[in-house]
Amino acid sequence: MTDEISVEQTFTQVDVVDQEANVNIEIIDAATVVGPAGPANVLDIGTVTTGAAGSSASATITGTSPAQTLNLTIPRGDTGATGPTGATGATGPQGIQGPAGPTGATGATGPTGPQGPKGDTGDTGPTGATGATGATGPQGPKGDTGDTGATGPTGPAGATGATGATGATGPQGPKGDTGDTGPQGPAGPTGPTGATGATGATGATGATGPGVAAGGTTGQILTKNSATDYDTYWATPGAASYTEVVKQYVKNDSTAKSKGEAVYISSADGTNPIVSYADADTEPTSSKTLGLLESSLSSNQHGYVITEGRLSGIDTSTATAGDAVWLSSTPGGLTFGAPPTGNVHTVFIGIVTKANASTGEILIKVQNGYELDELHDVSAASPTAGDIIQWATDGTNYMWRKKSISAAGIAASGHDHNGTYEPTNTAILKSLIDSKGDLIVGTADNTPAILPVGTTAGHVLTVDSSQTAGVKWAAQTGGSKVYYQAAEPTGAADGDIWVDSDDTSSIVANAVPLSTVDALGDLIVGTGNDTVTRLGIGSTGQILTVDSGTASWATNNAFSVIDAAGDIIVGTANDTVVRLGKGSENQVLTIVNGNVVWSDPGIHTFLGV
């Protein structure tokens, strides 16, 4: 690109030609009259500004002669076509070694090595503590009836039996002699009543009788408390139309009880049932559970038990609304949620309808649990150990009946589980084992056989498809062996290791002795064919390198060229570097005569000077 710029000033013409950033300036004096020689005009270069691509170049001159300044604006040239790719340069020298990277993750554990030969039997260890007694096994089958024992001694005399019935009347005897005269007969009937006599004087007033019991409220009725005359009390009768709550009028036993506690009918007094604490531990105290007390009762006091319906004003704070209520093993107590576990009698009491410490509510609907022999189609009273339940008849009716094994028609048989008996074709018999070290191996599907223990020391179990069992004991082939024995092994091969009984390693053939290593960090380095030596650990900061074909520790000089922050290592020739110190503020890295240098970004880069 070439731009012509004309700048007119008194008698002066300036032509500026832009030729690829080389600017030639020519000043022509156009005066036609030659005046006296003036001072030489000095034209300094002021600013050089890059204009937008496609704009016109311009120049301005400021100042007066002989000291003037030329300012230039040169448009940016169009982007040239991409040149051909240059040839690949020669491979540069290897960079300095970077710092060591972080230690990598631990590799996976290698496969377990082959098992070594069996060591000598160690001393017998101390006897371990006695283990816990195992669970009692199931009862064995009933044994055969034993021989009849000798007759026991005569028991003590029994109690005198009841008097027998009166015998029949004997025949009448002969008439006896006439007896003595009998007593006087009774008086005759009373004669008719005579006329009424005159009324006598009124007697003194007697003491006041017991009368009706004091107290009572409107609607209560007088109730007998016992058969004793005048032993009465006032009681509130149940309304005939009461349907929301069903309750029973009862008498408490001698133990005071609180509202909401569970009770059962333990007895009666001839008029009212007597209630006691219910609990789930026994059949009598659970099967006759009546309900929950409507109110607290003192000893022998009368009151009500709610058998069906809602009981309010009790503590249900440990429950959640909707929980089931069950009779617990605590006398009179309840449990919420799941029924009690263990050997208890399950009795359902009802459902919690409100959970609260003082205003809780339970909807009562007692449902007693049943024992097996309480079911209508089961006859299982007084069972003995080993009895079973069988659907059978007594000759008239079928039902579930308690029977012994023999009565049920089941043949008695059994076996122990100590390993001496195994069902055929379901387990491997211990009788297959003949000697110490025998192995049980499969020879086919569901077919076990014995592989006797090997007889040659050092033999290993080897796969051999030609064998019936598919394996055999044989000498090891390939790899190294480790011998742990007192005497030097025979038949050892190169690379095998012998460790004698006193734990001192003795090396067989060409293995490296452990004594070669003396300290932490030692390396074993090859110095020739089948020849090694110890290379002691180097000093801090040293690196492992090669010197004349030999591994050695050496000081790392890769960083000795660097003297200060910002230094740059620059190649000066093949395999040759030099340090280039950090430049000054705002300098740029450039090439001068083929060398990399720091330089100020001045005008000369545009003028070619």
Image (cartoon, rainbow, N blue to C red):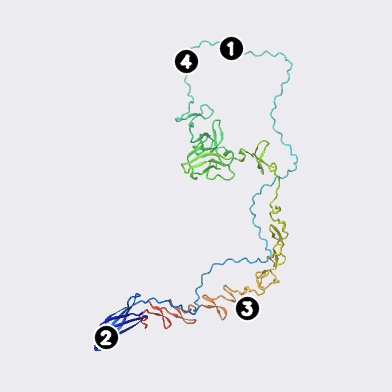
Provide the secondary structure element on which disc 1 rests: loop
Three-letter code for the amino acid on which mark 2 is drawn: Ala
Three-letter code for the amino acid on which mark 4 is drawn: Ala
- Give the x, y percent position of residue 234: 48, 30
* Residue 140 numbered mark, or none: none
Task: Determine contact: label 1, label 2, CB under 8 Å.
Answer: no
Three-letter code for the amino acid on which mark 1 is drawn: Pro
- Give the x, y percent position of residue 490: 71, 71
Front-most of residues 227 and 587: 587
First in residue order: circle 1 vs circle 3: 1
First in residue order: circle 4 vs circle 1: 1
Q: Which of marks 3 and 4 is in front?
A: 3
Residue 4 appears in view: yes
**Residue at image mark 2:** 30
Viewed as shown, does residue 536 lie left or right of 15?
right
Viewed as shown, does residue 509 lie left or right of 595?
right
Decide: is 183 above or below 432: above
**Residue at image mark 3:** 529
**Residue at image mark 1:** 189
What separation in Å lies between label 3 and label 2 (alpha carbons)?
94 Å
Q: Which of marks 1 and 2 is in front?
A: 2
**Residue at image mark 4:** 201
Decide: is 441 above or below 543: above
